[in-house]
Image (cartoon, helix red, strand yellow):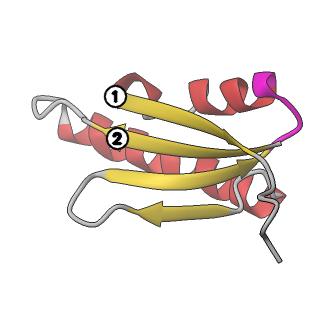
Amino acid sequence: MLFQVRMDVDIPRDLDPAEREDVVARERAYSQELQRGGEWPHIWRIVGHYSNISIFDVASNARLHEILSNLPLFPYMRIEVTALTEHPSAI
């Protein structure tokens, strides 16, 4: 199942710098593991924002929910999910 996911990140400015560095490093490692495994095949930065548009290719809605809720930055995110299907005019 394909999903487009927009993630907008808003880390509190008063978060301890060491904690911020740790959570960002864990986020990077977790997301790269999912990318290498094929469930997160695309990620693009939205210019001018601490946001991204990603494409997930997962087995189920439940799997996507599991992935997103386990993101280390999840507590600081606003997430919008759009389910995708093939377009009849696609080549």
Q: State which quarter of the image contains the C terminus.
A: bottom right
Sequence-first disc among 1 and 2 = 2
Looking at the image, which residue is at 81% across and 58% down?
38
Looking at the image, which residue is at 78% across and 51% down?
39
Q: Which residue is mark 1?
A: 76
Percent coordinates x, y for residue 41 in the rendering:
71, 62
Q: Nearer the viewer, residue 85 or 28?
A: 85
Looking at the image, which residue is at 38% across and 31% down?
77
Residue 67 highlighted magenta (yes or no): no
Magenta part, dominant SS: loop
Percent coordinates x, y for residue 2 in the rendering:
76, 47
| Mark 2 secondary-structure assignment | strand
Q: Nearer the viewer, residue 11 or 82?
A: 82
Q: Which residue is mark 2?
A: 8
Looking at the image, which residue is at 72% across and 32% down?
64
Q: Is residue 55 above or below residue 58?
A: below
Which image quadrant for residue 49?
Answer: bottom left
Magenta highlight range: 58-62
